Image (cartoon, grey):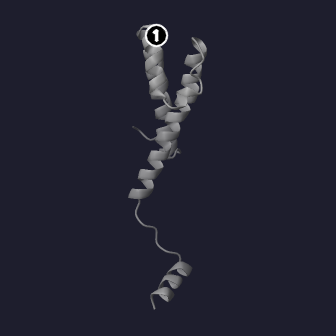
Amino acid sequence: MPLVSGRSPAREAALWAFGLHAFATLWIWWRWSRGFSAGVAFWMDFPLSLVYAGARGGWFLLAGLALGGAWWALLAAGLTRLVGRSTAPARPLSEAAARERDRQAR
């Protein structure tokens, strides 16, 4: 996944996840039979899809694109930040924090 300059990795992951979700949802909606595609779209966004489970037709598709895409974007951004923070090198302590650490070590 290429990183566009000026964007954080979490934001980039969120945009990719939203776009991939939209592409997959639209492809499933138009290429598969209507009842089967609605079921797959429902399970793709579960448990969030329980919010808009009563919607029919185009409203179901629109809700799935917007809410499901936002859900997957949030998950992707959160996981990217979590992995980024866990693999980042340790930051050097500030001078005050280093003094406090040394004082507690005595």
What residue sits 57% from the left and 17% below the top?
Answer: 60
Judge whether 29 appears above or below 81 on screen.
above
In the picture, measured across the screen, residue 37 lies left or right of residue 56, that is left
**Camera-nearest residue between 21 and 91:** 21
Location of residue 27 (image quadrant): top left
What residue sits 50% from the left and 81% below the top?
Answer: 98
What residue sits 52% from the left and 42% below the top?
Answer: 11
In the picture, measured across the screen, residue 30 lies left or right of residue 54, that is left
| Kind of element beneath mark 1 | helix
Judge whether 47 appears above or below 106 on screen.
above
- The quarter in which the N terminus is drawn is top left
Q: Residues within 10 Å of mark 1 (few under 14, many from 20)?
A: few
- The answer to whether residue 65 of the structure is visible from this angle is yes
**Camera-nearest residue between 24 and 15:** 24
What residue sits 57% from the left and 11% below the top?
Answer: 57
Judging by the rendered image, the residue that carries numbered circle 1 is 35
Judge whether 12 appears above or below 62 on screen.
below
| Extreme-top residue of the structure | 33
* Residue 17 screen position, x and y as percent: 47, 33
| Extreme-bottom residue of the structure | 106
* Residue 80 screen position, x and y as percent: 45, 46
**Camera-nearest residue between 84 and 104:** 104
- Count the labels in the image: 1
| Amino acid type, residue under disc 1 in the picture | Gly
- The answer to whether residue 5 of the structure is visible from this angle is no
* Residue 30 screen position, x and y as percent: 46, 10
Judge whether 106 appears above or below 64 on screen.
below
* Residue 8 screen position, x and y as percent: 51, 47
